[in-house]
Structure formats: structure tokens, C-alpha cells
Amino acid sequence: MEQLMKDFFLFLSKNKTLNAAAKKWGLRFGASRVVAGETIAEAINTVRQLNQKGLVCTLDHLGEFVYSVEEANESADYCIKTLEAIHQSGVDCNLSLKMTQLGLDISRELCMNNMRRILDAAKKNGNIFVRIDMEDYAHNEVTLEILDELLQDYDNVGTVIQAYLYKSADDIEKLKEKKVNLRLVKGAYKESPEVAFPNKADVDENYKKIIKQHLLNGCYAAIATHDDNIIAYVKQLEKEYNIPRTQFEFQMLYGIRPQSQVELAREGYKMRVYVPYGNDWYGYFMRRLAERPANVAFVIKGLFSK
Ligand code: FAD
């Protein structure tokens, strides 16, 4: 049943008609529990409140299914405005974004130009770090190629490696030389068993494997998970191999396990909250429901509250 629900929400997350409609609805169905607001000002306000609790943040201006040059450029402009707002407000925060948002499905050149504009703005606004989120498998290789090209000119960029893909350990080995700052995750998209582990236990095992591999390679790791077993595993690695706390951070999503976020910060770990904002919340929200169909309860409540 749980698997059926997961597949259902992942299927819904790709529905372009609902995605377009949701932009006009405002934050509905309880989405405000996991999305920080629709405007930059609301997002910065949330980040400030999280900073006061000892949490650092990464802001993500939500955007998916971008198929026109205008939309892609507008999305990049939004990212730049977000960087300026981070700098001007003095909050402790960096930026996360997606390649398809910047026009990757239109042309690689368009996406690359937008990415360079963003990274230049990030440099200008206090050398803010920019993380390229990893999307579905169809975009995986091209995202890594774009990163490789950007690393020739920028040191404030990194990406994400997904433990569910068979290729991830090899990718980490390839990125070792360049000491890339990587976010390590289990993986959020529906992938074929030809490219990804179908069983959760295998994903968890591979997740542990790549975390250890990347840390022992001496590279910076952002371990992005809500899974207590994985967090305990990282703490165990820290002790066993004397890994300095400056070499890694934990990350969780806004609105998910907020108490655990604060506790990790109190224990002295760097804890970064991924804070999405904007009116293009639909796909992101559906993927969060797919991860935990139990959360559908707050959708039902949301149906009656707004
Ligand atoms: P799971 O095995 O899914 O969950 C472990 C436990 O965590 C659960 O038993 C439950 O107790 C708790 N939990 C998990 N999810 C929820 C929830 N929604 N609500 C309440 N409790 C929950 N994926 C990508 O493919 N690309 C990315 O770029 C990417 N970036 C991410 C950035 C951050 C900061 C985070 C935290 C995740 C990101 N993900 C990304 C999503 C990731 O791949 C997983 O889909 C997601 O984190 C769920 O896996 P988990 O590690 O939390 O463990």
C-alpha cells in the first residue's frame, strides 16, 4: 500500500497541468508546512528565524517544467535576487537550484549562461556557495558535465549524489581529485531498476558506503537525511576516523523533523535547513508526500483550512 501511495504521488508530481494550476492557487493543502512562503521577503524572514535557533540554511526558489527561454532567464534572475537578498540581510544562508529551472531542457548553452550569471552574482554578494540539486536520472550525466565545466572557473559550486543510483560510488571517485563539496542523499525520483537499487535496504547500504568514501577521501560532505540510523552512522564515522566537524554538515528539509534539527545544532553539528519558497511548489510538495505518505493527513486538514 505504502509503495502504491509513493508511486501515486511521484506520478502526480510530474503532472504539468496541476503544476501550472497550483501556481495560481497560492500555498494550499498544507504546503506551507514545507514551503517557506511565496516571496523572497517571506523566505528571508524564515531563514532569520532558523538562524536564531542555531540553524544555517540554503534557499531554493522553486521552479520546474521550464520550457521557454524567458522562463529560464526569469528563474535565473530570481536566483540572483535571492543571492542579493541573502547578502543584504546578512543571514547565514546559501543557495540551491535545479538545472532544468535554468533551461537545461531547452539548451545546455542557455542553462550554462544562466549558471555563470548566478555564480558571478554569488561571488559578488559575499562569495555565496551555490548547490546544484540533482534531478532525475535523465538529467544526471549532463548535470555532472556542467559541474565539471563550471569547476574550471568557480570554487563556489557543488552538487548532489544520490545513493539509489548504481553509478554513485564511481561518480564520487571521479570527483575526488577536485575535492568537490557534495550533498549526499538517498534520492527522491522514481527510477528504473536498470539504473537504481529497487530495495530500500540496498539504498541505505549504498548511502553509508558513499558517505564513508567521500569523507575518507577528505572531501566536504553535506549529509542530507532525516534518517536517525544514518545520522548515528555519521557520528560513529566521526569518532572512528577523527573526522573534523568542519568537514561535514547535516541537512534536513524545512518543516521536517524540526526538533531533531535543533538538537543536532545544540550538539555542536552544523545543521543546514533546506528552505524552498515561491509559487511553483506543487512538484516539490508531491515528492515530500511520496517520501512519507503518512503526511497526507496534513493535506486533508489543508483541504478544509484554506
Ligand atoms: P527515509 O528513509 O525516506 O526516511 C527516514 C526517516 O526519516 C523516516 O522513517 C521518517 O522517520 C523520517 N522522514 C523522512 N521523510 C519524512 C517526511 N517527509 N516527513 C516526516 N518524516 C520524514 N533528493 C534528490 O534526488 N535530489 C536532491 O538534490 C535532493 N536534495 C535534498 C536536500 C535535502 C536537504 C534533503 C534533506 C533531501 C534531499 N533530497 C534530494 C531528498 C532525498 O533524496 C530523500 O528523498 C529524502 O531525504 C528522504 O530520505 P531520508 O534520507 O530522509 O530517509
Image (cartoon, rainbow, N blue to C red):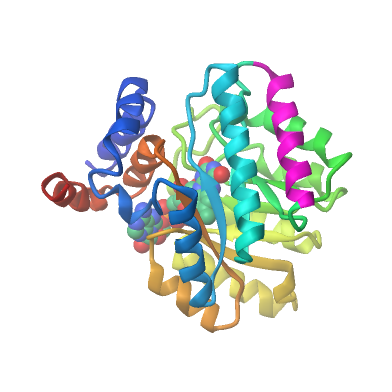
Residue farthest left in this picture = 304
Above or below — where is 69 with respect to 100? above
Residue 122 magenta-highlighted: yes
Front residue of 248 and 31:
31
Above or below — where is 62 with respect to 103? below
- Describe residue 226's horizontal placement relative to residue 178 as left or right: left
Front residue of 163 and 201:
163
Above or below — where is 195 with respect to 242? above
Residue 28 magenta-highlighted: no
Residue placed at 25% from the left, 50% from the top? Answer: 30
- Describe residue 275's horizontal placement relative to residue 34 as left or right: right
> What is the quadrant of the N terminus in the image?
top left
Q: Quadrant of residue 98?
A: top right
Question: Where residue 109 sits in the image (x, y, percent)?
Answer: 74, 20
Residue placed at 43% from the left, 55% from the top? Answer: 42
Q: Is residue 201 visible?
A: no
Magenta span: chief secondary structure: helix
Front residue of 284 and 89:
89
Residue placed at 39% from the left, 51% from the top? Answer: 37
Q: Is residue 87 visible?
A: yes
Q: Which stretch is magenta?
A: 107-124
Above or below — where is 106 with respect to 29? above
